[in-house]
């Protein structure tokens, strides 16, 4: 049983970051580059600082793994580790597109126990506790019963390294493009997963991710009755950087679709 204070803190931290984003959104903001296409803004940095300050004050013995802070390769030093993306969808945010989120997960002894994703513009708060189901603004949510790709609306994303390995990404995308009803790319992995959890998308796949992109959303999907695995159907590990998520009836077809796309290029 999760201590209610831990879930409340995850929610409080996500809402705190969301207030910062709303203050900056569609106003002049400092933008820097971490890579050719990878951006960071004042809002990212301020939101993560605020979250870290909250955890330091309330749980000084806990670790924080955040996109703008410690390396994803740093081993946890404490039994409790918060995994936070202070602004998932920075490119959207920087261009005034209202599709971004805050993602907060709590890992206890290596397993994610709490997941919170907040859309500060849509004011949608997704929350899950392991074994306790998933909720959107306090109401229970569930995945779809879709069982065939032809009836499925899917989501995906492309990594910042797509220029270096575009054929791999395009081949898998093309396979699903031929077989699914439609494919969407929102630009926020956390929202993609939450939209699977609440039935707006039937499935989602993506590679080259970080734990802070998917740790919270994956738990939300699982607690909404969905299946979450690695790209080849292996047990899901948020630190492995790849994910397939869907309703249980569609999952085998999703994993098989990825495999077909990779076979096109001999992988």
Image: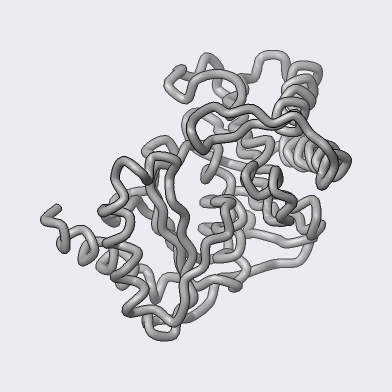
Q: Nearer the viewer, residue 186 or 210?
A: 186
Q: Nearer the viewer, residue 52 or 18?
A: 18
Q: Dividing the picture into quarters, in which one does residue 63 lie?
A: top right
Q: Relative to residue 36, is residue 22 drawn left or right? A: right
The residue drawn where x is 88% and y is 40% is: 23
Q: Relative to residue 31, is residue 261 drawn left or right? A: left
The residue drawn where x is 75% and y is 29% is: 30
| Figure label count | 0
User: Where residue 157 appears, x then y in whole percent?
Assistant: 47, 54
User: Where residue 101 appears, x then y in whole percent?
Assistant: 69, 48
Against 110, residue 75 (above or below) is above
User: Where residue 210 appears, x then y in whole percent?
Assistant: 47, 37
The residue drawn where x is 70% and y is 43% is: 94
Q: Nearer the viewer, residue 7 or 236?
A: 236
The residue drawn where x is 58% and y is 45% is: 216
Question: Is residue 123 visible from the viewing direction of this image?
Answer: yes
Q: Dividing the picture into quarters, in which one does residue 162 lie?
A: top left
Residue extending farthest to the bottom is 151
Question: Is residue 252 visible from the viewing direction of this image?
Answer: no
Against 102, residue 196 (above or below) is below
């Amino acid at each position: 049983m999760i201590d209610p204070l831990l879930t409340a803190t995850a929610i409080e931290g996500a809402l705190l970051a969301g207030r910062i984003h709303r203050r900056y959104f569609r106003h002049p903001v400092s933008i820097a580059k971490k890579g050719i296409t990878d951006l960071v803004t004042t809002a990212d940095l301020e939101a993560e600082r605020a979250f870290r300050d909250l955890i330091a004050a309330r749980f000084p013995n806990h670790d924080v793994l955040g996109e703008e802070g410690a390396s994803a390769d740093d081993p946890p030093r404490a039994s409790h580790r918060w995994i936070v993306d202070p602004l998932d969808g920075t490119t959207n945010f920087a261009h005034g597109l209202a599709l971004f989120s805050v993602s907060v997960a709590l890992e206890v002894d290596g397993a994610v126990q709490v997941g919170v994703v907040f859309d500060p513009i849509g004011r949608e708060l997704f929350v899950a506790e392991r074994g306790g189901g998933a909720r959107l603004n306090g109401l229970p949510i569930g995945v779809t019963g879709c069982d065939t790709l032809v009836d499925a609306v899917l989501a995906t994303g492309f990594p910042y390294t797509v220029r270096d390995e575009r054929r791999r990404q395009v081949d898998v995308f093309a396979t699903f493009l031929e077989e699914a009803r439609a494919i969407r790319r929102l630009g926020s992995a956390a929202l993609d997963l939450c939209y699977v959890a609440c039935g707006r998308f039937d499935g989602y796949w993506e590679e080259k991710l970080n734990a802070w992109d998917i740790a919270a959303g994956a738990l939300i999907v699982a607690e909404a009755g969905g299946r979450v695995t690695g790209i080849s159907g292996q047990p899901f590990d948020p630190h492995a950087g790849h994910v397939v998520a869907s309703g249980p009836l569609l999952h085998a077809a999703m994993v098989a679709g990825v495999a077909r796309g990779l076979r096109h290029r001999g992988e």
